Image (cartoon, rainbow, N blue to C red):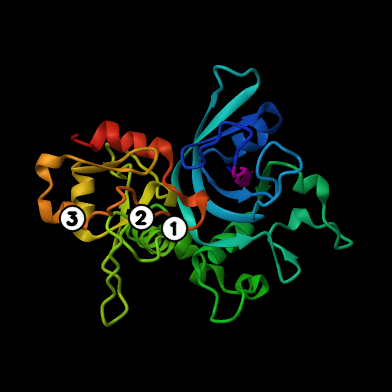
Amino acid sequence: MAKGIFTTKVNPTYDDLPEVRYHFPKTYLNQVQATVGDWIIYYEPRRQGANAAGRGGRQVYFATARVERIVDDPHRHAHYYAFVTDFLEFEHIVPFRQGGKYLEDALMKEDGSTNKGAFGRSVRLISDGEYQLILQLGFTKPTSGQMADADVIAAEEPEVYVRPMVEQLRFRPFRDAAFTRSVRAIYNFTCAMTGISIINGGGRPEVEAAHIRPVGNDHNGPDSMRNGIALSRSIHWMFDRGLLSLTDGYEILMVKELIPDPVKRLLNPEGKILLPADRRLYPHPQFLQYHRERIFKG
């Protein structure tokens, strides 16, 4: 087994849904096979889609997942799907280069120039140390006013500082905390359905992070911000129990006979939810469809 980097665009050329699957050609089959059963990191390149002139990608590492299995693409010759589990987005996106240092050693030649051949490969294998470093940067908030220094973090004792985080990736307390912090932040600590934001005297927000496709064993939803929405506690309770849902156009659906009138008056008068500032983080249609078909009682 080996750890790897999977490159996926904002508007994928392939049939990627990073939370669930990674679509790739036979060119990368050996490298992807090496990662089965191990962890990978998703990288967003500069190019946003198939158009060579399309720029605007963030050039960052943004999530981790564990590769579960590879299956043939039944519709496209010499193409495959890698299905993943335990997807978790980083709390802080990680630029591929920090302080003049590449976080993947293979991206730099001996003379210090960029190894464009390595950089151009959509699937790259990395060492455990490189994986742990990127993971550390993704879940450790930089000190105030400073960018996290890759050299400093790499110098930390891995058995004490890095390894516990790697071991916690599959445990709910760690994942729930990371998911909650991320979803609350992208919705500006505001309930998406009511527009209400309440912060207590200690600075703790009342709003909660709801999974659109639940994460339980019966549903296997991912810990992705595109599978999350910030909701006040009572609204969250109704959403989880199928009394509220959303259309693909982000319009609020409700089981009207089961929603009390005072709650109806709290919902956004426009009938639509508030959305994150970054379109990349909008609720994904596949998760919204799942909620309507499997959870919603309307």
Percent across and percent down for residue 53 are 76, 43
Residue at image coords 34%, 40%: 220
Cβ atoms under marks 3 and 1 closer than 8 Å:
no
Direction from residue 110 to residue 261 in the image, left or right: left
**What residue is disc 1 on?**
167
Residue at image coords 11%, 51%: 261
| View extreme (right): residue | 111
Give residue 293's quadrant in the image: top left
Image quarter (top left, top right, bottom left or bottom right) of the C terminus: top left
**What residue is disc 2 on?**
171
Percent across and percent down for residue 63 are 52, 52
Image quarter (top left, top right, bottom left or bottom right) of the N terminus: top right
Give residue 150's quadrant in the image: bottom right
Which marked residue is nearer to the observer: mark 3 or mark 2?
Answer: 3
The numbered mark, 3 or 2, whose residue comes first in the sequence reads 2
Percent across and percent down for residue 66 are 49, 44
The answer for how far apart the CA atoms under marks 1 and 2 are is 8 Å
Residue at image coords 46%, 38%: 20
**What residue is disc 3 on?**
265
Q: Magenta segment range?
A: 2-10
Amino acid type at image mark 1: Glu
Amino acid type at image mark 3: Arg
Give residue 241's quadrant in the image: top left
Q: Secondary structure at mark 2?
A: loop
Q: How many marks?
A: 3
